[in-house]
Amino acid sequence: MTEQPVRTTRQRRAVAAVMADLDTFSSAREVHEALRDRGESVGLATVYRNLQALADADEIDQLRNDDGEVLYRRCATEQHHHHLVCRVCGRTVEVLGPAVERWADQVAADHGFRDVAHTLEISGTCDRCS
Amino acid sequence: MTEQPVRTTRQRRAVAAVMADLDTFSSAREVHEALRDRGESVGLATVYRNLQALADADEIDQLRNDDGEVLYRRCATEQHHHHLVCRVCGRTVEVLGPAVERWADQVAADHGFRDVAHTLEISGTCDRCS
DNA sequence: CTAAGTGCAAAGTTTTTGCATAACT
DNA sequence: AGTTATGCAAAAACTTTGCACTTAG
């Protein structure tokens, strides 16, 4: 398993830069448009590839919205956390929930499940939007 | 908002019957195939429409897998619960987590969020599959 | 009878992929 | 120079929709 070299292309830098600025979860299409707005021309397929690569490298978080779209966001914390997302403006708060992690692992263990993983997202309307 | 009457068609009955038997989360395509296997001919679009209708009526649960597919399952409990799903065989255990619900609501309230909802799924490899 | 439900195929979305070209190292 | 990355367009995969036909009530 030799590690792949990663080339620093203009496109990769541009995608990373946009992700560093965006503070809400965004779809590939939205990132693509943000790039256009900045005058950076990057093919949509390349945006997909770079977002995927960034997610694989754990540099950005990845989740699916209710419509099945994959959304990406660069989070402040590197440790495991969950998101509280405003369903109107998309504002996102990163929250820790150690008790929940423990609960999930315990429940799984109680039923004989191994290699446990979990997903937890909280949504609501934030104060500014209600 | 007058309520729509619901007609009991052969197709609707067939879809409901299949869902009553399947005990794992299944995609529209899988339900469609299960119908074929039973000798019930139902158009795929109709399967989609009926699954959607059943979910809207809260008669079946609906979630998205990691691939973005929508999966459906008729659950035993009517009350709010979560799922512990085997990623190999799909076996599903319904689990309650009142403490988690309270935690989620509290976290959201702490940040001024209203109309809070959350999604939580646990996945792992069950004892039979590991 | 009349509106809801169905089937089929076409269209829509999001995401992936093949392949020739461009460009890091 | 040698490969990895890109761009474009085509393909995939899942889901929705338009419309004529069927059928429950």
Image: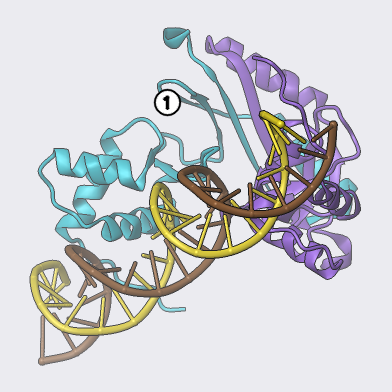
Chain colours: A cyan, B purple, C yellow, D brown
Tag 1 subunit:
A
Q: Residue at x 14, y 52 (%)?
A: A41
Picture quarter with the C terminus of chain B: bottom right
Mark yes or no: residue A101 visible.
no
**Could you say which is closer to the camera, residue D1 or residue A14?**
A14
Q: Residue at x 73, y 61 (%)?
A: B32
Q: Tell me the amino acid under the disc marked 1.
A: Gly
Q: How many marks?
A: 1
Q: Position of residue B93 (x, y in %)?
A: 86, 47
Binning the other alpha carbons within 10 Å of mark 1 as few (below 14), some (14 to 19) or many (20 upward) gives some
Horizontal side of residue B130 vs A51, given as left or right: right
Q: Position of residue A80 (x, y in %)?
A: 56, 40
Q: Residue at x 84, y 56 (%)?
A: B91
Mark yes or no: residue B113 visible.
yes
Q: Is residue B95 above or below residue B107?
A: below
Q: Is residue B4 above or below residue D23?
A: above
Indicate the quadrant where residue C7 lies.
bottom right
Q: Position of residue D16 (x, y in %)?
A: 53, 43
Indicate the quadrant where residue A46 lies.
bottom left
**Could you say which is closer to the camera, residue C12 or residue B64?**
C12
For disc 1, the marked residue is: A90
- Secondary structure beneath dot 1 equals loop
Indicate the quadrant where residue B129 lies.
bottom right
Picture quarter with the N terminus of chain B: top right
Q: Residue at x 29, y 54 (%)?
A: A47
Q: Is residue A121 above or below residue C12?
A: above
Q: Position of residue A23 (x, y in %)?
A: 35, 30
